[in-house]
Amino acid sequence: MFLKKVRISLTKKILPLIYKFVQILKSNTRTINYLNDKRIDVIKTYDFRKSIKELIGDKKLVGLDVGAQGGFNSDKFFPEKYEDYFEIVEVDPLIKSSSKNKKKSIINKGLWSSKGQRKLYVLENRPESSSMFEPDKDSLEIYDFKEKDFSLFNVSKTEMIECDTLSNSLKELKINNLDYLKIDTQGAELEILKGMGAFRPLMIKCEIRIFPMYKNEPRWTVIIDYLYSLGYILCEWRNIGSHSTRSPVEMDMVFIPNFSNDLGKSLIRTKQDYFISLMLITGQIKILKKIAKILKLQHTEIYMGIEDKYFN
């Protein structure tokens, strides 16, 4: 306890000096971004594979990646060493061939709130930004794109693609359960969520733009409100890319069941071994401890003694 107090005291005295030096170098933002990235990277220092094996055995967490141009976990949201614990389903209408990976299924169509055909704006110079919504080039300045790069958002062509709901698409694959849902679809996030039916993932990572990049895309607050109505709560967000505002204009937002209402409590308690596994994999240690105490979850011997290095 004494050493901890000394460490905190020294830190309070040293940090202001470091900050003044950083100011002189005019590197405030770069330093803050670097330190924040390193703070997030602390997840790599853990190894929970033995614990996850104790929790779920040889069973798999079902992960659905909607907008899978880069591949499942391409953004390294969690360390690669945990990917083997997932049964992966990837969704992307621009992927034309079936996967040979036995751990992976591919849905070669779009997802929406209803079944039918919809127009896809294809950006061949930047395929990961293709969308059901037309790009709004007037917004690119806010995202710090240089004018010479605006052409990346030229619509190469439009295609009418077959769409179905998330619920229908998983049932066609005889999948009746979903644990982790990742959505990166350039504006279609809300419509996809509306098509979940009875599926209730234990964790949802959704790319959300505070400042619209596409014409007529839903407001970010509507997406959050909709997820709250389904029994979810926001537990983390991570900045994506550059921006000209004081807060990020595009983020990955992470939602978990709202442990303070009946919908969320029921979902966590029903699948607590899978929930605990996901929270460990994604480094959500401190909040896992709080939820375990509130809901009296099991297996506390696995995680209660773990230090959450993110909050050091």
Image (spheres, helix red, strand yellow):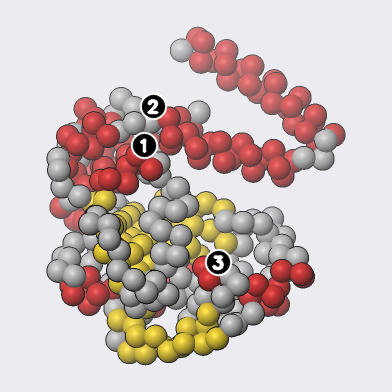
Left or right, 26 with respect to 12, comes to right
Which amino acid is tagged 1? Answer: Ile
Left or right, 160 with respect to 281, comes to right
Q: Is residue 53 above or below residue 200?
A: above
Location of mark 2 (residue): 307
**Quarter-wise, where is residue 304 in the image?**
top left
- How far, Cα to Cα, is label 2 from label 1? 8 Å
Q: Would residue 188 be seen by someone viewing this image from the given angle? A: yes
The dot on residue 46 is none
Q: Residues within 10 Å of mark 2 (few under 14, many from 20)?
A: few
Location of mark 1 (residue): 285
Q: Would residue 113 be seen by someone viewing this image from the given angle? A: no
- How far, Cα to Cα, is label 3 from label 1? 27 Å
**Quarter-wise, where is residue 163 in the image?**
bottom left
Label 3's element? strand
- How far, Cα to Cα, is label 3 from label 2? 33 Å
Q: Earlier in the sequence, mark 2 or mark 1?
A: 1
Q: Is residue 147 above or below residue 162?
A: above
Q: Position of residue 117 (x, y in %)?
A: 37, 90
Q: Position of residue 71 (x, y in %)?
A: 41, 58
The dot on residue 209 is 3
- Residue at image point 49% right, 57% down: 252
Q: Position of residue 219 (x, y in %)?
A: 52, 74
Q: Position of residue 108 (x, y in %)?
A: 33, 75
Q: Earlier in the sequence, mark 3 or mark 1?
A: 3
Label 2's element? loop
Which amino acid is tagged 2? Answer: Glu
User: Badges 2 and 1: C-beta atoms under 8 Å apart?
Assistant: yes
